[in-house]
Image (cartoon, rainbow, N blue to C red):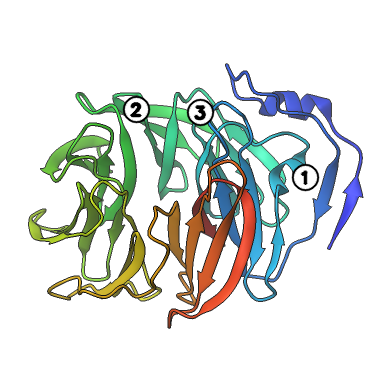
Amino acid sequence: MKRFNLLITAGLLLLMLPVGSCMKYGPSQTETFLPGPAGEGMFIINEGNFMYANASLTYYIPGSGKTENEVFIRANGINLGDVAQSMSIYGDNGYIVVNNSGVIFVIDPDTFRLKGSITGLISPRYIHFIDARKAYVTDLYQEKITIVDPQAFRISGHIPTPGHRSTEKMVQWENYVFVTCWSYDNKILVIDTATDRITDSLEVGHQPTDLVLDRNGKIWCAAAGNLYRIDARSRNIEKIFPLRADGARTHLALNAFSDTLYYLNKSLWRMAINQATTGNTPFIVLDDRPYYGLAVDPVSSDIYVADALDYVQPGKVYRFNPGGEPVDTLTTGINPGSFCFK
């Protein structure tokens, strides 16, 4: 599956270091990974611990159940950095957003090798692609969203967000991107992608986090212990569903057909997108404690639940089939928080 390559180009490693970072990035010996099965594979983004520079990347092949941990450092000879927040694939590139290191690493999603990096960011959270030459990056500490050129690996502009310094998740409906404002905020901003300007905002509950768009053009948002269903065209809140776990962060995901919503609220719940209530019985009963992440395979609709355990030891990811039956348990890096499917 892989063979060792002990040669490291020091100059390349230096170029990849994010500006202003104090992390110890390496170098160390590298491995060469061969591409896995075409169209199959999933990345698990492990945050690591804040200020410990121990973020990592796990790669999982659902068909075989094969798991490879620490693939970023093993492929490149340098650490991923401090708090890996999220990852997205666009075209032939994978973009790993490393929050506290202020960098987006760009890799080959088949070999995990670095292609470049986007630096000059403060505290990036998520990246959303408008087209091949424009993407938006949200930020924890800045009152602006950064516009980047994902092909040139550079910052190309900013969208001011006055009064909103903690932008988070994004979804797009037609030419408009909806963005949650998370820390000590209660707004969803609406950005016109033609002008890169905020044109509207919606008020929801305190600290909106996850955001997904279903097949009917409805946006689902979790905030303040409630679940909001918003019509993307009219931007009206159609319904508010009360949830059960006060104060717990709620993670959202849609199945492969975008007609069924899953949400983590202590246990795992499931509801049809046109359902009138959330129901009284969990879809999968889990231990009564917070979980760290949720994803649904966009092809198979298999469900993945991330468990950070004690936030110090390697975490776990539990895989279930669409019927809710256990399929696999994976050991990951520290604090598995998000997922990216090839």
Hey, what amino acid is under mark 2?
A: His
Disc number placed over residue 51 in the picture, else none: none
Query: Quadrant location of residue 78?
Result: top right
Callout 3: 10 Å neighbours few (<14), some, many (20+)? many
Q: Earlier in the sequence, mark 2 or mark 1?
A: 1
Whole-number angstrom distance, CA of label 1 to CA of label 3:
21 Å
The answer to whether any part of residue 305 appears in the image is yes
Query: Callout 1: 10 Å neighbours few (<14), some, many (20+)?
Result: many
Residue shown at the point (42%, 42%) measured from the top left: 126
- In the rendered structure, which amino acid carries the disc numbered 1? Arg
Q: Quadrant of the C terminus?
A: bottom right
Residue indicated by mark 3 = 100
Residue placed under numbered mark 2 in the picture: 158
Residue at numbered disc 1: 74
**Viewer-proximal residue, 144 or 241?**
241
The reply to whether residue 194 is in sight is no
- Give above or below for 251 relative to 184: below
Badge 2 element:
strand
**Residue at horizontal 45%, vertical 75%?**
301
Which of 342 and 244 lies nearest the eye of the viewer?
244
Image location of residue 34, percent across then percent down: 79, 60
Q: Is residue 307 above or below residue 296?
A: above
Q: Is residue 52 left or right of residue 7?
A: left
Q: Nearer the viewer, residue 52 or 3?
A: 52
**Label 2 crowd bin: few (<14), some (14–19), many (20+), radius 10 Å:** some
Q: Decide: is 250 above or below 299.
A: above
Secondary structure under the numbered disc 1 in the rendered image: helix
